[in-house]
Image (tube, rainbow, N blue to C red):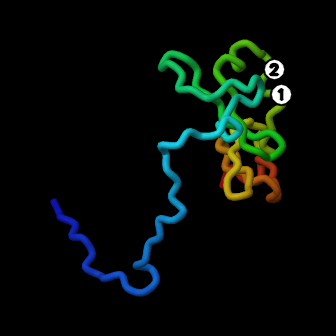
Amino acid sequence: MRRVRPSRRRISGPARRISFSTVVSTEEPIAPEHQPTCYLCGRPTYDPDKRERPWVRATSGGHQVLVCPSCQEERPDWAVQLDRCESCGATRLTAMLGQVVCRACGHVRGEPVQPAWMTTGA
C-alpha cells in the first residue's frame, strides 16, 4: 500500500497568520431566542430516540425551519406550510448561502425549470 507523505511546503505571508478573536466559547449558554425550535409548536430541539422519527429540515418563506417528531405525528397537515421545489414538488429544501436548494433533485430556486421530458433520455 502506498504511503502518503505530508506536504513539505511552507506557508508564508498573510495566510500563515491565524486569528482566534472571532471564536466563541461553547461554555456560555445560548440565549433562548437564538436556540432552534420547532417551526409549528416552538418546542426546543432535542435528540429523538433512535426508534422515533427524526426532526425534519425544510424551508418556509425561504428560511430554514425544523419540524419536531411530535408535530409530524400529531398534525396530518404539518407539511402544508412548507415551501415546495419548483421542479419536483418535494419539501426537502435547504437554505444555504442565500439560496434555497432541493435535496431531492438538486434544483436551485430561481433558476429556470426545465420540463422532465427534456432532461431524461438520450
Q: How many marks?
A: 2
Instruction: Report which quarter residue 22 is drawn in.
Output: bottom right
Percent x, y of residue 84:
80, 39
Q: Are marks 1 and 2 in contact (CB under 8 Å)?
A: yes
Please give the name of the residue rendered at 72% of the width and 19% of the height, measured from the top-left corner: 71
Instruction: Report which quarter residue 53 is drawn in.
Output: top right
Instruction: Report which quarter residue 78 is drawn in.
Output: top right
Q: Which residue is mark 2?
A: 77
Q: Residues within 10 Å of mark 2 (few under 14, many from 20)?
A: few
Please give the name of the residue rendered at 74% of the width and 37% of the height, measured from the top-left corner: 90
Q: Is residue 59 positioned above or below 15 on the image?
A: above
Q: Is residue 27 positioned above or below 70 on the image?
A: below
What type is the residue that disc 1 sits on? Val
Q: Secondary structure at mark 1?
A: loop
Q: Residues within 10 Å of mark 1 (few under 14, many from 20)?
A: few
* Residue 58, disc: none
Q: Quick one: quadrant of the N terminus? A: bottom left
What type is the residue that disc 2 sits on? Asp
Percent x, y of residue 104:
66, 41
Q: Is residue 97 positioned above or below 83 on the image?
A: below
Q: Quick one: quadrant of the C terminus? A: bottom right
Please give the name of the residue rendered at 44% of the width and 72% of the height, measured from the top-left corner: 18
Please give the name of the residue rendered at 65% of the width and 37% of the height, measured from the top-left corner: 35
Percent x, y of residue 10:
31, 82
Q: Which residue is mark 1?
A: 80
Q: Outermost residue, top direction?
A: 74
Q: Nearer the viewer, residue 70 or 82?
A: 70
